């Protein structure tokens, strides 16, 4: 174990559940956050709390920490996903012709359900942020925002399952690759929103909003490409 004990910082035991760790983190973040207007506000302490939760809040990193290993920062996963997306796009490119029936089936069973799920997630973000802006430190408002984030993650997982349910026709390889990028950006955005809902750090909110905007642009690009295919 390193000299700085993350369990002590979050005031939890080594056997604490992930839910207990998250609850402890939210409680301490509210107590020590510099913008909380409380006498306990402490910039240095909030840095230590954030660092501790970054490790213990993730089951895999927590296991590595318990085994005295140095965990990797989340951006490593994003870089890996980007490389996987590029590889996916290259591997899916094909030159053979495919029947219109297969294309229509993919658009009906894969593209349209994903479009509905992703659009629902993206279109509700601004409304959720506007409601939370009244008082980000209000537990009830934050609970509503967290419900939105949880539902968004659930819908995203459903969209990913649909995307993986059947191979895309070769003629739709480009569209499928853009959908893949869109889902990955959306996953990263939801992750940032989850961090914001725990530590009230606006940088996570702003990063999440930007990732959602990128997802929205990609989704619009999908729409344009699908329209071209349909109208041919």
Image (tube, helix red, strand yellow):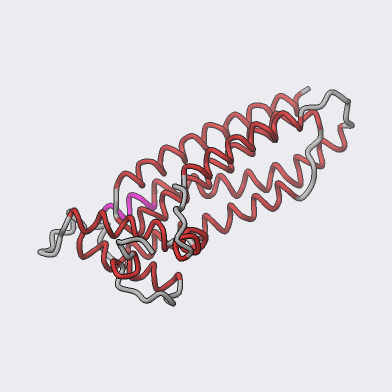
Left/right of residue 185 with respect to residue 128 in the rendered view: right
* 66 up-or-down from 174: above or below: below
Give residue 154's quadrant in the image.
bottom right
Q: In which quadrant is the N terminus drawn?
A: bottom left
Depth check: 7 or 4 in front? 4
* 160 up-or-down from 58: above or below: above
Q: Position of residue 2 (x, y in %)?
A: 35, 61
Q: Is residue 29 magenta?
A: no
Residue in view at x 81 percent, y 38 percent: 104
Q: Position of residue 46 (x, y in %)?
A: 24, 57
* 62 up-or-down from 232: above or below: below
Q: Position of residue 209 (x, y in %)?
A: 40, 41
Q: Which region shows up in magenta? A: 128-134
Q: How many marks?
A: 0
Residue in view at x 87 percent, y 37 percent: 101
* 98 up-or-down from 14: above or below: above
| Predominant secondary structure, magenta span | helix
Left/right of residue 44 with respect to residue 229 in the rendered view: left
Q: In which quadrant is the C terminus drawn?
A: top right
Residue in view at x 27 percent, y 57 percent: 48
Residue at far left of view: 39
Give residue 38's quadrant in the image.
bottom left
Left/right of residue 91 with respect to residue 129 in the rendered view: right
Q: Position of residue 49 (x, y in %)?
A: 29, 60
């Amino acid at each position: 174990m390193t000299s700085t004990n993350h369990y002590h910082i979050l005031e939890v035991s080594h056997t604490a559940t992930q839910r207990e760790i998250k609850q402890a983190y939210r409680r301490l973040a509210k107590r020590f956050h510099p913008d909380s207007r409380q006498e306990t506000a402490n910039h240095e302490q909030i840095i230590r709390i954030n660092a501790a939760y970054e490790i213990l809040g993730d089951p895999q990193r927590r296991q590595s920490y318990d085994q005295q290993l140095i965990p990797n920062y989340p951006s490593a996963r994003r870089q890996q996903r980007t490389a996987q997306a590029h590889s996916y796009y290259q591997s899916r490119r094909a030159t053979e012709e495919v029947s219109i029936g297969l294309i229509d089936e993919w658009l009906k069973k894969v593209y349209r359900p994903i479009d509905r799920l992703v659009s629902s997630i993206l279109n509700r973000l601004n409304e959720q942020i506007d409601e939370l802006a009244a008082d980000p430190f209000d537990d009830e408002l934050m609970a509503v925002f967290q419900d939105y984030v949880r539902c968004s993650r659930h819908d995203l997982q459903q969209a990913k399952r649909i995307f993986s349910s059947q191979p895309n026709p070769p003629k739709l390889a480009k569209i499928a690759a853009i959908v893949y990028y869109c889902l990955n950006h959306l996953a990263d955005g939801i992750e940032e929103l989850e961090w914001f809902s725990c530590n009230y750090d606006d940088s996570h909110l702003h990063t999440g909003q930007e990732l959602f905007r990128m997802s929205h642009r990609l989704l619009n690009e999908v729409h344009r490409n699908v329209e071209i295919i349909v109208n041919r």
